[in-house]
Amino acid sequence: MRRVPSILFRTLATRRATSYVVHNRLLHGSVTAAALGHDHRRRFPYLLAPFAAASLGVAGALLSQEVLAKERPPPEALPRDVVLYQYEACPFCNKVKAFLDYYDIPYKVVEVNPLSKKEIKWSEYQKVPILMVDGEQLTDSSAIIDKLGLKILSKKIPDSTSEDEETKWRQWVDNHLVHVLSPNIYRNTTEALESFEYITSNGNFSYIEKISVKFAGAAAMYFVSKNLKKKYNITDERAALYEAAETWVEALNGREFLGGSKPNLADLAVFGVLRPIRYLTSGKDMVEHTRIGEWYARMESAVGEPSKIKP
């Protein structure tokens, strides 16, 4: 993993990362000392100089520390044209985006209307995500990541029968974690509407489409979530979400990431599927009632800003 000086990283990283509060306070103190030295330099030049030097020395030592940066593949390995067909709140779509963002692979996004699916009429595969990579259609989030890992990172991904830790937890995301999300974000009409407000605000929908998608989609998913609860034997959706979050924290076993000092594909998968719910009611409840918040903040910092190409 490449590393960058802390001062540059703080400029790029999310403000939600809590590990830099002390740094910022010390920097504020050093800037204040420098300002005082400027305002009164004619009166106290020799008195203030040692204190300013000491303050700047402490801040400089802190700034010299290194923090994690994105894992960028070599430029020659990057594809020329990457287009993601997605639903904004789809956990599988966000899993792919977490991978693209972390490895800083530029991509375009096409928001698919969940009712008409007109944006993917051209494809026989009528689900999302669909990732077009230099004209090649890739489908299924885990398969997409496996193929990109091999093609762009020259990284051999263990097959589905492998029992290594990374593969085990990637499978846990696909087979368990994602199934507790829908019953939570659509558990009542208020939260269902909240979710679809988020979806429609991030898509290129007309006013009429926004209204129809928001209300029809919220109503449909409210009833779908009830069926999912029965299918996966979920009695208390919040309890199931909290249990899943704690299960993941236990898997970390005190490490910053499952991958150790940097995220691996399992970290990116968990982060990806949780990202669309993090600032909805269900995600806020999850962070408040479990220990997952610190890991999530570290992941926000490591993944950094989206590499999505703005239209």
Image (tube, rainbow, N blue to C red):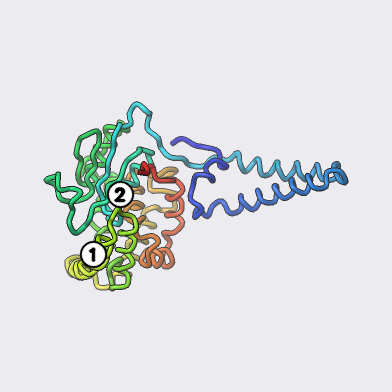
Left or right: 149 as drawn, with respect to 103: left
Left or right: 217 as drawn, with respect to 239: left
**Which residue is identified by label 2?**
95
Mark 1 nearby-residue class (10 Å; few <14, some 14–19, many ≥20): some
Q: Residue furthest top?
A: 76
As displayed, is residue 19 above or below residue 79?
below
Camera-side mark, 2 or 1? 1
Q: Residue furthest front?
A: 207
Q: Earlier in the sequence, mark 2 or mark 1?
A: 2
User: Which quadrant would residue 310 be assigned to in this image?
Assistant: top left
Q: What residue is shown at x 33% (from left), y 51% (from top)?
A: 272
- Amino acid type, label 2: Lys
**Which residue is identified by label 1?**
212
Q: What residue is shown at x 27% (from left), y 65% (from top)?
A: 211
Label 1 residue SS: helix
Q: What residue is shown at x 74% (from left), y 45% (from top)?
A: 34
Left or right: 7 as drawn, with respect to 302: right
Picture coordinates of residue 147, whole percent (x, y): 24, 37
* Quadrant containing the N terminus in the rendered view: top left
User: Which quadrant would residue 230 be assigned to in this image?
Assistant: bottom left
Q: Is residue 173 visible?
A: no
User: Which quadrant would residue 284 be assigned to in this image?
Assistant: bottom left
Q: Nearer the viewer, residue 179 or 52?
A: 52
